[in-house]
Amino acid sequence: MNNFSPNMLKTFKSCPIKYNFKYIKKISIPQKASTFEKGKKIHALANYYLRGDNIDKLEKALTSEEKQIWTNLKNNEYFSKSYVNSEYNISCKTGNYWIGGRLDALMKDEKFYYILDYKTGTIPKNPEYDFQTMVYLLSASKIYGSNLKFVYIDLKNNQNYIINFDENKQEEYQKAITEICTQIENAMLPEETEHFKACEFCEYKKICI
Ligand code: SF4
């Protein structure tokens, strides 16, 4: 049985054909290294740092832009809370489906647990109902209870976007996730599709119908 990640749900929502290429046929298209390089580097650095590894050499190798982003993260109030885990795989069952993903970090203080998500690009347009928010909050709440917050750390603009776990929203989150998982399971892929704006930026456009 599939363990649905937020990326799988987002990809299906944006284009079922892309989902088919990526997760059913498992076709991977190489992308420009620069697109993800900065984000990957900062995520790796943050993980080593939180685990207590020596990162002196890695810090010296950062470009000035990366250094600024890294400084923003190191000085972030949520990143400075007590460490629980990082690059942390977490999952739970919702309806008939397993959902889960990898948290950038989980921190805590006397009152709350904080799911951290570092963004070197933009934060989601509707963060409360983003699949990542819903999947991570539901999964973490099963282990850590409801004193939980999701913190998107926008490293470019050096600001945080915080979502409190709300027990009243649990059902709504579960419904939204179960619906999309059911759609994925029952998906009938169209023979042909109209190409729309997202196609312009899609890595599969060269092989797409
Ligand atoms: S090119 Fe367009 S239709 Fe084809 S997979 Fe990408 S987004 Fe979907």
Image (cartoon, rainbow, N blue to C red):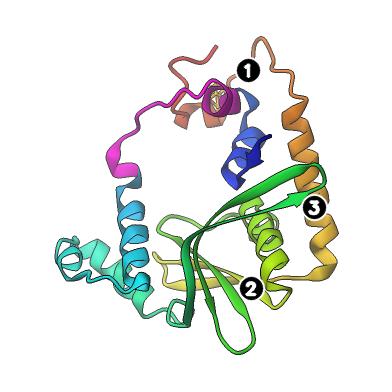
Spot occupied by residue 101 in the image (x, y as percentages of width and height): 57, 51
Spot occupied by residue 162 in the image (x, y as percentages of width and height): 60, 72
Magenta highlight on residue 181: no
* Label 2 or label 1, whichever comes before in sequence order: 2
| Residue annotated with mark 2 | 149
Magenta stretch: give its range.
18-35
Mark 2 vs mark 1: in front: 2
Spot occupied by residue 41 in the image (x, y as percentages of width and height): 30, 56
Mark 3: secondary structure: helix
Which amino acid type corresponds to the residue marked 1 in the rendered image?
Glu
Which amino acid type corresponds to the residue marked 2 in the rendered image?
Lys
Residue 196 seen in the current view? no
Q: Is residue 111 above or below residue 5?
A: below
| Residue annotated with mark 3 | 174
- Residue nearest the observer in this picture, 131 or 115: 115
Q: Is residue 73 above or below residue 131?
A: below
Which residue: 59% across, 28% down? Answer: 19
| Residue annotated with mark 1 | 194
Which amino acid type corresponds to the residue marked 3 in the rendered image?
Gln
